[in-house]
Image: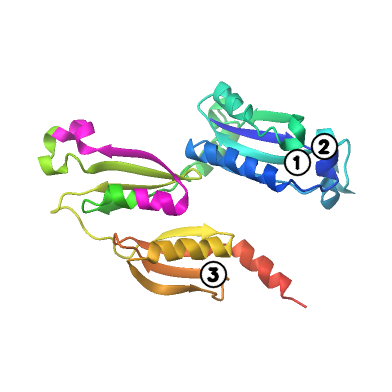
Amino acid sequence: MKFMLIRRADANTENGALPSQEMLAAMAAYNERMIQAGVLVSGNGLRPTSDGCLIRFENGSPTIIPGPLSPPSERVAGYSVLDAPSLQAAIEWAQQWPVLDADGSVTLELRRYFSLEDFEPGAGLEQHRTLARVPDAMNVHVAFPGSCREAMQFYADVTGGHLECLLTYAETPAAEHSPPELHDRIIHASLNLRGRRLMGADMAADCYTPPQGVAVQLEYQDIAQAARTFAQLAEGGKITMPFEATFWSPGFGMATDRFGVQWMINVSSEHCLAATEGDTP
């Protein structure tokens, strides 16, 4: 189940007061715990309503009402999207909100997302079901010749993702149908990266084929972090294209790591657009 955890605005957030370094660290630690648990899908803080507006429709005609908007307590200062098995589980995560925020005096609102199953059947719903042919997620699965455990632990260290599964052949019914040399190898590994997963498995020698023509792409907004990730993945491997500015991005590189997996590290196009606009006289 998906939930939105809303941090209501207050006088400080509406005045544009930025959080202290201590508060930023506490929030980062909170988010890290949720990432490790596979709960945090995304989250963002919002600038004050003075930087935004209301768009109000009457009889289909829009009226723009510029900020600031009041009262602050009815506005949104930020939000997190959580993927939790139940409302109670989401509440338990919400109760761990950092006490440094506003000296522990904040208002949070927790709302569950609708799903298509919540609606009565009908033509309108079928149009949404047509849109639902787009998968809920697209993950990457990589085959290894026996190095899956080492590779996935390495990728977890590099990306900070949550290694949520390392399952051996011996731990599954497949053991009785597998050669003994495969029993301590990995039949399923899953690295959770903000709800997207890099999966892997070891293959028998006669079934393994090195990956070709496919690369795992990681997207960053922080150029320095993107460069660090690229350097770590390329170490002991082979650089196909050095990490540097391109016409579409201030930072992009391609490399094959020491496990034979190809990577593309890219700084997001939004960052590129902002940088381009900033250079415009």
- What is the number of the mark on residue 10? 2
Mark 3 nearby-residue class (10 Å; few <14, some 14–19, many ≥20): many
Residue in view at x 25 percent, y 41 percent: 187
**Label 1 Cα crowd, 10 Å radius (few <14 / some 14-19 / many 20+):** many
Residue 123 x/y as whole percent = 57, 34
Closer-to-camera residue (147/135): 147
Figure check: 250 above or below 132: below
- Alpha-carbon span between mark 3 and mark 2: 38 Å
Instruction: Tell me if 15 is positioned left or right of 239 in this view.
Output: right
Cβ atoms under marks 3 and 1 closer than 8 Å: no
Q: Residue 110's quadrant in the figure?
A: top right
Question: Which of the labelled discs sits on residue 187, or is there none?
Answer: none
Q: In what element is the residue under mark 2?
A: loop
Q: Position of residue 4 (x, y in %)?
A: 64, 34
The magenta span reads 153-175
N-terminal-most mark, 2 or 1: 2
Instruction: Give the residue drawn at x 67%, y 69%.
Output: 275
- According to the image, label 1 marks what residue? 77
* Residue behind mark 3: 251
